[in-house]
Image (spheres, rainbow, N blue to C red):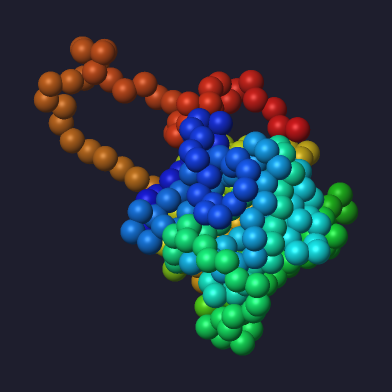
Amino acid sequence: MRPHVEIIDQADLIWHPGEFPLAEGAAVQKHLAYDEEDGSLSAVVRFDTDWSRCGGIHHADTEWFVLSGQVTIGSEVLTEGGYWMAPKGVVTPAITATKGTEILLFREYGDWGFEPADADRPGLREDQVLVIVRSAEMEWLPVEIGSPMRFDLGGTPVPGLFIKMLHRDSETGFYTRLIKAAGGWQEHPLAHHPVYEEAYCLEGGFEYNFGTMWPGTYFFRPALVRHGSFTAAEGVGCTWIVRCDGDLVDWYTENASIEMHGTATNWGPELPHTIAPVLPQPVRSRSIGDMADRTFQ
């Protein structure tokens, strides 16, 4: 299984050779989360030259989300916000990427294996087909049930959270979606879920119990890990791409606290060098630096 990752900044990660057999061109990738048992992967990929690969089938459910640049899949041209998903066993048409393009790559339940194919092969179910979406052309749908509401100047409750569903498996509930929180949106209780949750921050900023997110930061959280309380950056809010391996159910915990008691033996105030510094927040990434001076654009 993939380990708990919370949180990292992609700027702190190193580039690895791209895992794209049968491809022409140069690609490198940064591993956000990697399952060493079955090869599942979440990664940032950069194409350092014009790049191409023939049509074929992946050994894993595979998703691309275009961060910048241009990807052409079959006859479909995708730019920033473009997304495609191919279940294992479903043919992905020939694909190209222009030099400098960056994507998020998600590979689930399998490794980087790829076999050439020029005709559709049946998926495990009839509804397993290639999905292509241009998220920039989609409307944001307000979340009015199960999410805290904000209030306008007249005191009327208005949604503070919005989604764009990119893909959802009708049988398992596994989904990939964009989520946008309005500036200042808050949710106070700690929450945990029966499914894993991962997110990559695309725009804005967000504070919660594990630290602060900004564009390029990421977490992978296994099921049942408690997290909260949430506050989106004032004025700009926050936008993420979020994935879960099943329907997301929120289980909330109010009035949570952690207490530790004991008697010091070989450390204490009389030995200042043994006292851990009190930090304003957990530091999970070298690039975090001094958050007091950080502003979100």
Residue 96 screen position, x and y as percent: 71, 52
Outermost residue toward the right in this view: 154
Left or right, residue 162 beside residue 64: right
Residue at the location (57% across, 63% down)?
62
Quarter occupied by the N terminus: bottom left
The correct choice, above or below, for 268 with respect to 141 in the image is: above
Q: Is residue 264 something that shows in the picture?
A: yes
Q: Is residue 175 something that shows in the picture?
A: no
The correct choice, above or below, for 276 with respect to 96 in the image is: above
Left or right, residue 266 beside residue 147: left
The correct choice, above or below, for 143 with respect to 96 in the image is: below
Q: Which image quadrant is residue 267 in?
A: top left
Residue 189 screen position, x and y as percent: 52, 55
Outermost residue toward the bottom in this view: 126
Residue at the location (72% across, 39% down)?
99
Residue 232 screen position, x and y as percent: 67, 44
User: Which is nearer the eye, 103 or 175?
Assistant: 103
User: Which is nearer the eye, 118 or 92?
Assistant: 118
Residue at the location (37% across, 51% down)?
3
Left or right, residue 236 beside residue 2: right
User: Which is nearer the eye, 129 or 214?
Assistant: 129
Residue 222 screen position, x and y as percent: 42, 58
